[in-house]
Image (cartoon, rainbow, N blue to C red):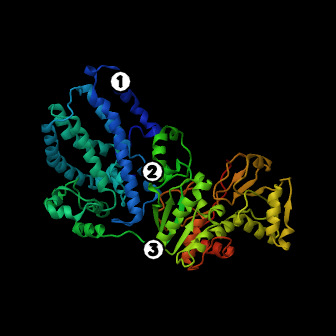
Amino acid sequence: MASKPGILYDWPWTPLGNFKYVVLAPWVIHHTYPYMVKDASGRDLPMFLVFPFLLLRMLHNQIWISFSRYRTAKGTNRIVDKSIEFEQIDRERNWDDNIIFNGIVFYMVATIKSTANMPIWRTDGVIITILLHVGPVEFLYYWLHRALHHHFLYSRYHSHHHASVVTEPITSVIHPFGEHVAYFLLFAIPLATTFFSETASIVSFIGYISYVDFMNNMGHCNFELIPNWLFSIFPPLKYLMYTPSFHSLHHTQFRTNYSLFMPLYDYIYNTMDKSTESLYESSLSRQEDSPDVVHLTHLTTPESIYHLRLGFASLASQPHDFKWYFYFMWPLTLWSVMLTWIHGRTIVVERNVFKNLKLQTWTVPKFTIQYFAQWQRESINSLIEEAISEAENKGVKLLSLGLQNQAEDLNGNGELYIRRHPLLKVKLVDGSSLAVAIVLNSIPKGATEIVLRGNLSKVAYSIALALCQGGTKVGTIREHEYKKLKARLNPEARSNLVQSKHCATKVWIVGDGLTEEDQMKASKGTTFIPFSHYPPKKMRKDCFYHHTPSMLAPKHLENLDSCENWLPRRVMSASRVAGILHVLENWNVNECGNMIFNIEKIWQASIHHGFRPLAVTPKA
């Protein structure tokens, strides 16, 4: 947000929110329908192609976003190490506004002059387009850009763009509406000249706009990808083509490297940053990061692909929630599912920094439903073992197992890997002790009895033991759960374990397997506290629901710009937090299988390092 927003700062369709695409609908229908019903002589091919081209531009941008986030998460050739936060994601969520605007202008052109006779290719038009870009466009952009850095225009417009010190591909088009209009008029010089001189062609239009999109995305991707041998073969190329590190310096230094795509004018007017070449060389030689802690998770539903940090940035910055438009995206969803199946290995999806620790999140390309299929277990265990082996080779200190990667039926809460590889240096942690601590500390003060319901796990047994030993009555409403708990508790603790069909208590500790019928038995105002990885379905509007075991991350945990599954912003699951704490405290022990770490010790460590418990969620 600019400090002093000027006129035409907001886009005209901003009040429409996610329904902004309706402004394109009349134009699309007007130019698509006639093409489908008219004979060949009456069709306007260029106008028909506008809408598919707009969709292609969106896809092109999304590919750059995913590729950039993958490369910067791994660290290879990364330029700037500073973090990206939720504020930047929110500011850049409307990166498609410029595509909508361009589409409307293209359609409006057809009302001035017919495009029906525009050829697919004209050599003279292509040459004119290139010359006009190299000459007027690059020159005028340089001076326009310098003018935008004058304090009057900078405070009203251009500071909006420069709020992103660490850039992503979509940062390139994040400008106020008025500023974007100025850019459009500039880039329209080659297009308008060839169009009105009747030398334009479909290829020259699509090619030029695609070139601008490509160079914009590349210049803001925050990793260096232009090989040095290109400049060695043709040294003058450094005047004709910029690099990502060249433009990154403009965002960190502000008063240098003003050029559009050709650094020529920075050389001419002596505004080239002196560290341009050294940053290029250092970024190009930078190796992949070696993390200290890895959190290994997996996909949940087919739509969760969109919520990955490598997916749609705006969706990744929000807790998982099914959107109505996912129904219309099923071809893309199916293609994404096939891609995960073909890829067949873990993917680095996120990097974070906490104090001196380098953190990464890796994702197993399997969905939750596959973890419950017997025929998939060998494949999943192989993927997890490969991830552990890779972490071992990279010198990772600890790998935390998230969600079903620590399932008892799959690998005995991770114990399988310890038995198979007894000499492992990397430690494996499932975070059970912290999950227990979080649940225990979520119980309202003064509660003397609770109901325990759900599929029993080592977390559930540990919670029951701690409560019974502390004098809290633990009630069960299922006989088989009562018998299992009784068999695991010591004689002293059993005295506080009761089986009852009466559910007067207003504190329920619940896990997977909680049914709607169970929830209906609870009293009005009951608080449901999950001990499971997955949240219960909220069936009661007169009750309260806690989040799954998790904690709010401290502010100095950097680069946290996406949500972990269904958890709110800057909230991390117990298993993820536990892995960080184990390394910070140098505990150097495994926590998997039936092992439970010291519950009080890990709780105090979490508070000491700035992690905080969450407040109860509002009524459903």
Q: Nearer the viewer, residue 89 or 467?
A: 467
Amino acid at circle 2: Leu
Q: Which residue is located at x 37 percent, y 29 percent? A: 28
Q: Is residue 419 above or below residue 498?
A: below
Q: Nearer the viewer, residue 266 or 286?
A: 286
Badge 2 density bin: few <14, some 14–19, many ≥20, Cα 10 Å: few
Name the residue type under label 3. Answer: Asn
Query: Residue 49's image quarter?
Result: top left
Disc on the earlier residue, 3 or 2: 2
Q: At 82% from the left edge and 69% from the top edge, which residue is drawn?
A: 471
Image position, residue 284 (x, y; %): 29, 67
The reply to whether residue 130 is visible in this rendering is yes
Q: Which residue is identified by label 2?
A: 339
Disc 3 to disc 2, C-alpha distance = 26 Å
The residue that mark 1 highlights is 36
Foreground disc of the pair 1, 3: 3
Residue at horizontal 72 percent and vertical 55 percent from the top:
528
Q: Is residue 245 left or right of residue 573?
A: left
Q: Which residue is mark 3?
A: 393
Q: Nearer the viewer, mark 2 or mark 1?
A: 2
In percent of width and height, residue 348 lies at 45, 62
- Sooner in the amino-acid sequence: mark 2 or mark 1: 1
Q: Is residue 205 left or right of residue 511?
A: left
x 40%, y 30%: residue: 25
What is the secondary structure assignment of the residue under circle 2? helix
